[in-house]
Image: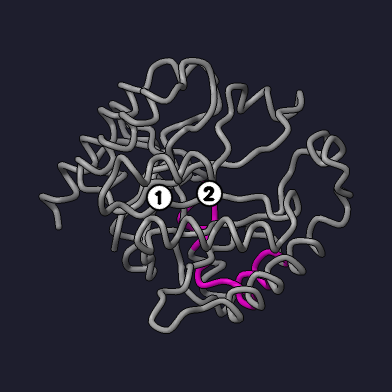
Amino acid sequence: MQLGVNVPNFGPGTDPGVLRDWARITEGLGYDLLMVSDHVAVTPDVAERYPEPFYEPFTTLSWLAGVTTGVRLGTTVLILPYRHPLLVARMATNLHRLSGGRLVLGVGVGWARQEFAALGVPFAARGRLTDACLAALRDAWRAETEDGAAPIPVWVGGHSAAALRRAARYGDAWHPLRLSLARMRTILADHSLPAFAPRIALRLTGTPVDDPDRIAGVGTIEQILDDLDQLRLLGADTVVLDAYHGDPEEARRPHAAWRALTEVATHWRTAS
C-alpha cells in the first residue's frame, strides 16, 4: 500500500517557496503521491475554508513536476463541471506526458453553490455534468492513446449513492474523503467498486481518541498506524494523508504538518 500527501495549494502564507518545500519534503520522506485541491472562483463560501491565494491545480502540479523526480502528482479532487471535458482531457494528458506518466486525476462534483453561480454552471446539474464529463474524458483518451502510453488513473470522490455508482462505472478507484473506518468498511462490503484509495485526516494527539465516530487518521501515532493497517486489510491501494483541518491560519504554519508527516513516515517504514 502506498501513502500520499494532500498539499495545501491555498491560504495565507502559501507561495511558490512553500509549495516547493511541501513537494521536496513529501518526496524526501518517501511518500508516493502528492495531491492538491481545486477551486476556480474563490467566492465567499469557498474563501471561508480555502482562501486566496489559491493556486490552480494543473498549473501547480506542472510546476511541481519540475522540482520532483518520481513522486506521483494528483488532484483531490478536480471539480469536473467547472471545465469543458476536452480542456480537462488535454491538460491532463499534457501533464501526464510531461511528468513521465505521474498524474492521478481525482475528480468530484463540487459543493460550493456560489462558485457554481459565479462560473455560470447549474449547481443542480452537477452530478449529470460530472457523468457526462467522465464519459467524454474516456472517449477523448481512447482516441488519443499512444501505443504503450500509461493511462491516467481516475479516482472518483464522494460517498453518496450517485457517487458510488459513478465510481463503479467510470473510475479506476473510489476516493472517499475523511470518513470513519466503520463507514468505509460498510460501503466496501455493500458495493462492488474498482479499487480503493481513500484520503484520511492526519491529526496526531497526545492521548487516544475514544470517540466512536472518530474519523480515520485522528488520534495517537498508534491509532493512526492501526488505521493504516486496517485500510490495507480493506484493500486500499493508496492512502492520502490530509493534515489541513479547516483553519486557514494553518497555512502559515506548515512545519506542524511536516512534523506529523515525518512521524508517520518514520513509524510506517519501521512497522512495514
Q: Which residues are magenta?
A: 162-184
Image label count: 2
Instruction: Classify residue 255 by image quadrant.
Output: top left
The relative height of residue 119 versus residue 126 in the rendered view (above or below) is above
Earlier in the chain: of badge 1 and badge 2, it is: 2
Q: Nearer the viewer, mark 1 or mark 2?
A: 2
204 vs 37, nearest the viewer: 37
> Where residue 35 sits: x, y (%)?
44, 46
> Where residue 67 sits: x, y (%)?
30, 40
Please give the name of the residue rendered at 54% of the width and 42% of the height, measured from the top-left corner: 57
| Secondary structure of the residue carrying numbered label 1 | strand
> Where residue 58 sits: x, y (%)?
54, 46
Please give the name of the residue rendered at 87% of the width and 57% of the height, measured from the top-left corner: 125
240 vs 88, nearest the viewer: 88
Is disc 1 in contact with disc 2, using a CB cutoff of under 8 Å? yes
Which residue position is annotated with label 1?
240
Instruction: Classify residue 157 by image quadrant.
Output: bottom right
Magenta stretch encompasses residue 83: no
Q: As shown in the figure, which amino acid type bears the numbered disc 2?
A: Thr
For the residues labelled 1 and 2, the Cα–Cα distance comes to: 9 Å
Magenta stretch encompasses residue 176: yes
The relative height of residue 255 versus residue 122 in the rendered view (above or below) is above
